[in-house]
């Protein structure tokens, strides 16, 4: 009995020891098992803390980038419109492309709103460029002060109604070209977004089949360099074109007075209306009835008006009598003390009959008109120079002398 009891006790001890080992090994396995719920939960929490949040982008920053990119890309459009008087449809693609690149550079969100933003920004830029920026450049080229008052007058002034209508017509054409230009890009973007494209692999091409997946994607660093290179090239081209236009616009123009052999030297500080049609359109029909050309000085120091009258209209009256009678008419109206005597002036080897008279303008400014009469073979050229009285006559003489050089 004692032996049997001893054997039974040994077996129990051995069994208990085995069970304890099994339990210990299970506990170790549970601790090491990555599938354990508590272990998984703890692991996920730690990874969530360590893993940074992925940037999804922002429609706001993307819109800002699209505006800046579109404005940079609109430079060729502005130059061709303002200096070459041309609208090139292909340049609308540049504006849309610039908006697209600007959107990506500024980390814009790639979603369904992206094509909408691209379309709206491109159309707004074309509208602003066509109705504001280009007209202001044209105003500056014409020698007027660049102000929003002068810009407004293009649209509301009766004398410039034709100009305003032409700008609106150009805007309509520009918007049509822009819509055509961005249609392909917007369609491509819609297709790629629906197929799960991201900002890193989004392309202009609408071919988003397996062929594109087999191609090696351009690294972001190289793409950014490519974008910057394009922008820099566009800016260099723009600067060169502007510089060339400035140089060309600064060259003096030679104007032949209608019906004569007289040639006038118009410099970069002067704006010329060389026909009655131009005078009528820009200044008014009443003024066009009297003058054959008008020259305005950019800084508004003076204004030159010219009129050709055939000698036959004066009959046998000699030139001295003609100018004296003209002078007397003004002396009777303004007073002898405000009217100078008639004299001869030699300007650049040409002989002029000259006199001047003082008057007060409608804006209560003290003004003076210098009158020059030049005799040609069959015609007389009357030149009137209106200026403020503070400008010396000798300075006006120099203007007339330069005009005939």
Image (cartoon, rainbow, N blue to C red):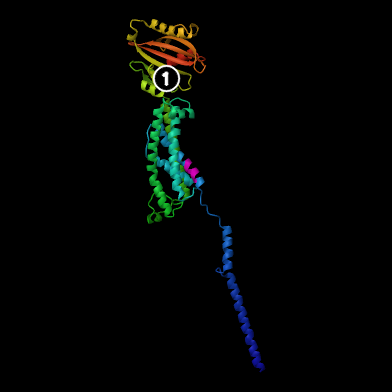
- Residue 205 at x, y = what percent? 39, 49
Foreground residue among 291 and 219:
291
Residue 23 picture quarter: bottom right
Is residue 1 rendered magenta in the image?
A: no
- Residue 288 at x, y = what percent? 38, 19
Foreground residue among 248 and 65:
65
Q: Residue furthest toward the bottom?
A: 1
- Residue 191 at x, y = what percent? 40, 52
Foreground residue among 133 and 364:
364
- Residue 154 at x, y = what percent? 43, 28
State the residue position of label 1: 295
User: Can I make out residue 393 in this image?
Assistant: yes
Horizontal side of residue 51 vs 297, given as left or right: right
Residue 296 picture quarter: top left
User: Can I make out residue 147 in this image?
Assistant: no
Quadrant holding the N terminus: bottom right
Foreground residue among 340 and 288:
288
Residue at 49% over, 11% down: 358
Residue 239 lies, with reference to residue 400, above or below; the image says: below
Residue at 64% over, 87% down: 10
What residue span does the magenta drawing correspond to? Answer: 62-68
* Element carrying mark 1: strand
Dominant SS of magenta comes to helix
Report the number of discs.
Answer: 1
Residue at 39% over, 24% down: 281
Residue 304 lies, with reference to residue 146, above or below; the image says: above
Residue 17 lies, with reference to residue 246, above or below; the image says: below
Quadrant holding the C terminus: top left
Horizontal side of residue 349 vs 56, given as left or right: left
Category of crowding for the residue at label 1, using alpha-carbon neighbours closer than 10 angstroms: few (below 14), some (14–19), many (at least 20): some
Is residue 64 rendered magenta in the image?
A: yes
């Amino acid at each position: 009995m004692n032996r049997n009891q001893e054997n039974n006790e040994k077996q129990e001890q051995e069994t208990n020891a085995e069970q304890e080992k099994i339990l210990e090994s299970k506990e170790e396995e549970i601790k090491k098992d990555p599938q354990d719920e508590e272990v998984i939960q703890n692991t996920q929490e730690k990874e969530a803390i360590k893993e940074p949040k992925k940037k999804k982008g922002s429609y706001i920053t993307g819109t800002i980038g699209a505006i800046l990119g579109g404005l940079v890309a609109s430079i060729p459009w502005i130059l061709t419109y303002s200096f070459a008087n041309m609208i090139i449809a292909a340049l609308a693609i540049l504006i849309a492309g610039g908006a697209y690149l600007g959107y990506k550079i500024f980390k814009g969100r790639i979603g369904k709103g992206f094509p909408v933003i691209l379309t709206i920004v491109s159309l707004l830029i074309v509208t602003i460029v066509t109705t504001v920026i280009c007209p202001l450049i044209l105003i500056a080229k014409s020698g007027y002060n660049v102000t929003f008052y002068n810009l407004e007058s293009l649209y509301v002034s009766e004398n410039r109604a034709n100009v305003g209508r032409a700008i609106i017509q150009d805007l309509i054409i520009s918007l049509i070209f822009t819509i055509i230009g961005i249609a392909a890009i917007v369609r491509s973007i819609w297709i790629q977004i629906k197929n799960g494209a991201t900002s890193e692999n989004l392309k202009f091409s609408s071919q988003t089949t397996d062929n594109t997946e087999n191609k090696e994607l351009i690294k972001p660093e190289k793409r950014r360099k490519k974008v910057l290179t394009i922008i820099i090239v566009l800016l260099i081209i723009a600067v060169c074109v502007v510089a060339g236009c400035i140089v060309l616009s600064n060259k003096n123009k030679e104007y032949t007075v209608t019906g004569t052999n007289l040639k006038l030297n118009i410099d970069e500080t002067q704006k010329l209306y060389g026909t009655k049609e131009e005078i009528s359109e820009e200044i008014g029909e009443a003024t066009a009835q009297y003058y054959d050309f008008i020259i305005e000085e950019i800084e508004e120091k003076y204004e030159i008006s010219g009129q050709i009258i055939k000698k036959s209209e004066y009959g046998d009256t000699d030139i001295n009598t003609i100018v004296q009678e003209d002078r007397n008419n003004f002396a009777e109206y303004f007073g002898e003390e405000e009217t100078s005597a008639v004299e001869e002036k030699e300007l650049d080897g040409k002989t002029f009959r000259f006199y001047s008279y003082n008057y007060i303008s409608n804006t209560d400014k003290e003004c003076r008109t210098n009158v020059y009469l030049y005799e040609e073979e069959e015609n007389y050229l009357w030149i009137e120079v209106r200026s403020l009285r503070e400008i010396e006559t000798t300075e006006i003489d120099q203007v007339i002398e330069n005009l005939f050089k």
